[in-house]
Amino acid sequence: MQYNTPDLDDRSKYLRSLVVRGLKGGNRGHVGSSMSPIEILRVLYDDVMHYDPQNPAMKKRDRCILSKGHGCLALYALLADKRYFPVEELDRFCHRDGILGGHPEQNKVPGVEASTGALGHGLSIGVGMALAARMDRRDSRVFVTMGDGEINEGSVWEAAMCAGKHKLSNLIAIIDYNKIQSAGLTRDIQDLEPLADKWTSFGFAVEEVDGHNIEALRAVFARTPFNLEKPTAIIAHTIKGKGIPFAEGDPKWHHHSRFAPEIFQKMNDALGVSNA
Amino acid sequence: MRKACINKVHELARNDPRVVFIGSDLSPGLLDEMKAEMPLRHYMEGIAEMNVVGMAAGMALDGYIPFVNTIATFLTRRCYEQVALDVCLHRLPVRLIANGGGVVYAPLGPTHLAVEDIAIMRALPNMTVVAVSDHEEMKRLMDVSLEWPDPIYIRLGKGGDPVVSDPDNGFTIGKGIMLREADKAQVLIVSTGVMTGRALTAAESLSPEGYECDVLHMHTIKPLDRKLLLQRASQVKTVITIEEHSVIGGLGSAVVDCLVEGPLSTIPIIRKIGLPDKFMENYGVQDDLLEIHGLQPKAIAQFIRETL
């Protein structure tokens, strides 16, 4: 899929700088995996979801599950930006007494809806939350963001069948399709194509979108649910490591630890952000 | 026992809007009345244990108390990660109702025998593990289950087991019950599940011979009633554990752990009666496998004689 993606705007760059702050704080982290879903989460939190950082347990909120828990720095960036917790927490990423671990935990981090990290769990939890909303006659929606490598897991497809069966139009599955998993290109490790057809055949209404184009993302979310009788799947075409040119599209930047001291400045220089 | 348990889910659901039933491809018509009465809280899902456990966790995160029911092996082995992370890490009040704990499904072979379920469930932080002795005790467990904040693994027996529990003893999760108190007992038998009935029979048969045994029914294997166990164990020279489960990691191991952790200055002799560390090689019925592995009352009595 070829898209004419606009350049990242200041807000997207700022959110990425928060990811860099976390990487620096922990001197480790999933670099590529945290950069690719930034615009997806930004649009959800800025334009789509109903929530209140002052009252994270508000019953009528929409739920956002980051099923690809290893990309948690992206979620932490949004939650810090929305003041669920002080932005300084990013400096303590993975610290022994910090609340922000290498995978997000629901009972530690305000705003995190489900503890994830083992892949293939989020969609089932989302199905349960979507059914809970139906039982409560609540109009909450549940957004589950999964990685492309993650959907190798069979449990994802169990959950997909179940969501289709129950016609969960309040459930929105988003695939951060950056085409790279840990070992290499998804098309070499475990090809997912034809991906849209897979979700369609499991009972979802599916659309594909440029996962870095803010206007396109706003438009696609505004059209959800695409079908009142079906759950939604949005295949967001993204670039692993987006915004950090030397990491973009390089599987070696999936996860990194013990960074060279100058790397954070290089990342921020690439983002055009002064403070490293 | 299963019927008592499942019917109780319906009864609890009538009185508490948080109660949900989730089955994984069970018998046709199971809880149809509940389905008719409250269709949104009765789910019969496919053969997808990973999904049903994750889905139950999602519901529980939003305030529901889901009772998930399927065959014990599939509810433990197949979806262990979902039980560990989705349920236990979030510390949610999900109830796992496990059909055929132990060797109930003897004719179906090792794929269907849950002989290490207690071990792997009790290894999980926040998990509660319960194996009642009969269907009457099952009802009492279910009645108190809604008040318990943590996940519960409910191990079901075959059903039709003789009633050995006593309503006068009540039922508190985490509290053992002395079902037999002998005068000057030499042995403390600690048993769980339907083995408690067999333990009582064995103890009765030994009494005329001068071997006196107390029987402590430990329906809750986790959290273990340490206080009662330590108190009773300190009064005897020998502790015998009996379970329809591998000798690795089950009730016997829990008892050993408790006794060695102290504070008893002298630890009694401890012997574990259970299933050997191997896949079952025979079929037949549950009683056949129990007999082959020395878990029927006669063999239990003989084991105790020899130990003494």
Image (cartoon, coloured by chain):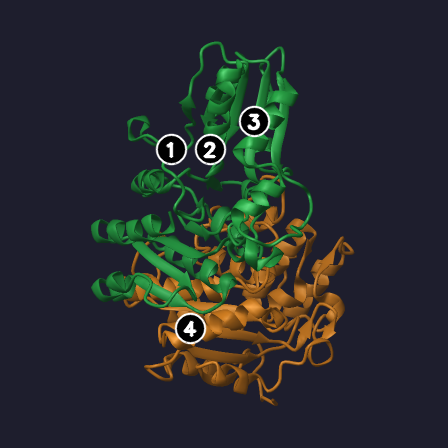
Chain colours: A orange, B green
Q: Which residue is mark 4?
A: A163
* Mark 1 residue element: loop
Asked if residue B97 is positioned above or below residue B234 in the image, the reply reads: below
Tag 3 near tag 1, CB within 8 Å: no
Which quadrant of the rendered structure holds the N terminus of chain A? bottom right
Tag 4 near tag 3, CB within 8 Å: no
Residue B99 in sight: yes
Name which residue type carries label 3: Ala
Q: CA distance from mark 4 to mark 3?
A: 54 Å
Which numbered disc, 4 or 3, marks the residue closer to the eye?
3
Residue B28 lies, in percent from the top left, at 36, 68
Mark 1 — on which chain does it sit?
Answer: B
First along the sequence among labels 3 and 1: 1
Mark 2 neighbour density, 10 Å: few (under 14) some (14–19) many (20 or more): many
Q: Which mark is residue B164?
A: 1
Q: Which residue is mark 2?
A: B196
Q: Within the image, what quadrant is residue A249 found in?
A: bottom right
| Residue placed most toward the observer, B186 or B277 | B186
Farthest front residue in view:
B208
Tag 1 near tag 2, CB within 8 Å: yes
